[in-house]
């Protein structure tokens, strides 16, 4: 296996590497959230938002966000996470609370903290990106801007393989494959590009949750046959979650965290799932259930409402 063979984007076929061949990657253990003061539903950016504007309970949403924040604070106290920071939302940026989307932080092979800034599909969301760029600049990150694409939505679509220098990139709704071509070249990591074919799963983080180096849970209906075949080459155990459960409970927008230094594992998930909870229990996760119903009306749950960084 040569670097030339590895550091590229794969969309189908036999992979020229196995997971054990890949270099180690340090997992981020710091959490960023965005205050929901300006959260609202004023248009339809995804299928989940249709007809939901009049039903949004903003006070309830703030309470649900506070409950999620409390779980992260508890995990910091227990030593699983290192810290929690909160960025203020901005007026006119009603979706800014979903802070997984505006950026993709990454620690390079030379331990440089970089952050790739998103190119959001919707104009109102494009206004969110500079606030996050300023946040990361203040932490010593080097911001990077795409030159070859006009669509990339951060960690909503770009999910690392646990502990390895390998990325999975969703495309078809909010991100394009040319973003992954540029990202793979610049970071010197292979990227498996997965076409998302179901409108319910418009971001990869709504249908795909790596649990460990060998385990993943997902909704098979979100992917093409070619994409699923690539996933099968990367994980020994695939927990398939029924599509109805994935749509109704947003269980595949769960956030799983593993601290290899303290041997702690936690999963935060929307209340109401069954198959996903069973998979998490089998994989040894301590499960925290939380209510995110008001945010689900806008198409997001736990994973969307945070950003992990170094």
Image (tube, grey):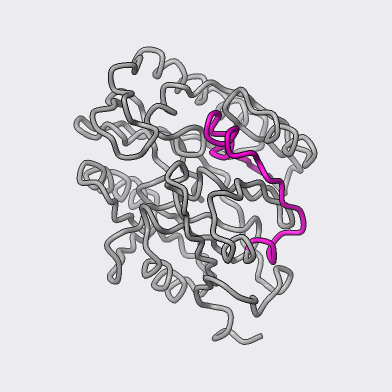
Residue 125 in the image, given as x and y percentages of width and height: 26, 43
Residue 59 in the image, given as x and y percentages of width and height: 36, 12
Q: Quadrant of residue 236?
A: bottom right
Quarter holding the N terminus is bottom right
Q: Residue at x 71, y 46 (%)?
A: 239
Whether the magenta-drawn stretch holds residue 71 is answered as no
Residue 263 in the image, given as x and y percentages of width and height: 76, 43
Q: Is residue 187 above or below residue 39?
A: below
141 sits left or right of 120 in the view: right
Q: Is residue 186 above or below residue 271?
A: below
Q: Quadrant of residue 272?
A: top right
Whether the magenta-drawn stretch holds residue 237 is answered as yes
Q: Is residue 183 above or below residue 77?
A: below
Q: Residue at x 60, y 53 (%)?
A: 27
Q: Residue at x 31, y 59 (%)?
A: 151
The total of numbered circles placed on residues is 0
10 sits left or right of 102 in the view: right
What span is in magenta? Answer: 231-258
Q: Work out whether residue 173 or residue 136 is closer to the camera in this orientation and state it.
A: 173
Q: Residue at x 68, y 47 (%)?
A: 211
259 sits left or right of 271 in the view: right
Residue 279 in the image, given as x and y percentages of width and height: 74, 39
């Amino acid at each position: 296996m040569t670097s030339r063979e590895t550091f590229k984007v794969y969309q189908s076929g036999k992979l020229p590497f196995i997971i054990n061949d890949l270099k180690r990657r340090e997992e981020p253990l710091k959490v960023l959230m965005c205050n929901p003061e300006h959260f609202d539903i004023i248009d339809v950016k995804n299928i989940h938002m249709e007809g939901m504007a009049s039903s949004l309970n903003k006070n309830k949403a703030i309470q649900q966000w506070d409950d999620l924040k409390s779980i992260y604070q508890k995990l910091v106290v227990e030593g699983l996470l290192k810290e929690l920071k909160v960025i203020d939302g901005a007026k006119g940026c009603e979706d800014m609370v979903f802070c997984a989307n505006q950026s993709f932080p990454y620690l390079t092979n030379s331990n440089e903290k970089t952050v790739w800034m998103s190119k959001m599909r919707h104009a109102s969301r494009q206004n969110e990106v500079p606030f996050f760029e300023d946040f990361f600049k203040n932490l010593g990150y080097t911001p990077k801007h795409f030159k070859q694409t006009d669509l990339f939505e951060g960690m909503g679509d770009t999910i690392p393989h646990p502990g390895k220098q390998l990325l999975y990139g969703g495309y078809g709704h909010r991100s394009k494959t040319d973003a992954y071509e540029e990202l793979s070249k610049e970071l010197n990591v292979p990227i498996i590009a997965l076409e998302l074919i179901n409108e319910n799963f418009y971001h990869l983080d709504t249908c795909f949750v790596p649990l460990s180096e060998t385990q993943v849970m997902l909704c098979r209906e979100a992917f093409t046959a070619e994409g699923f075949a690539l996933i099968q080459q990367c994980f020994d155990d695939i927990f398939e979650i029924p599509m109805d459960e994935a749509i109704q409970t947003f269980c595949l927008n769960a956030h799983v965290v593993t601290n290899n230094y303290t041997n702690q594992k936690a999963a935060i998930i929307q209340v109401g799932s069954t198959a996903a909870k069973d998979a998490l229990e089998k994989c040894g996760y301590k499960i925290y259930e939380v209510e995110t119903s008001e945010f689900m009306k806008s198409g997001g749950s736990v994973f969307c409402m945070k950003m992990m960084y170094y």
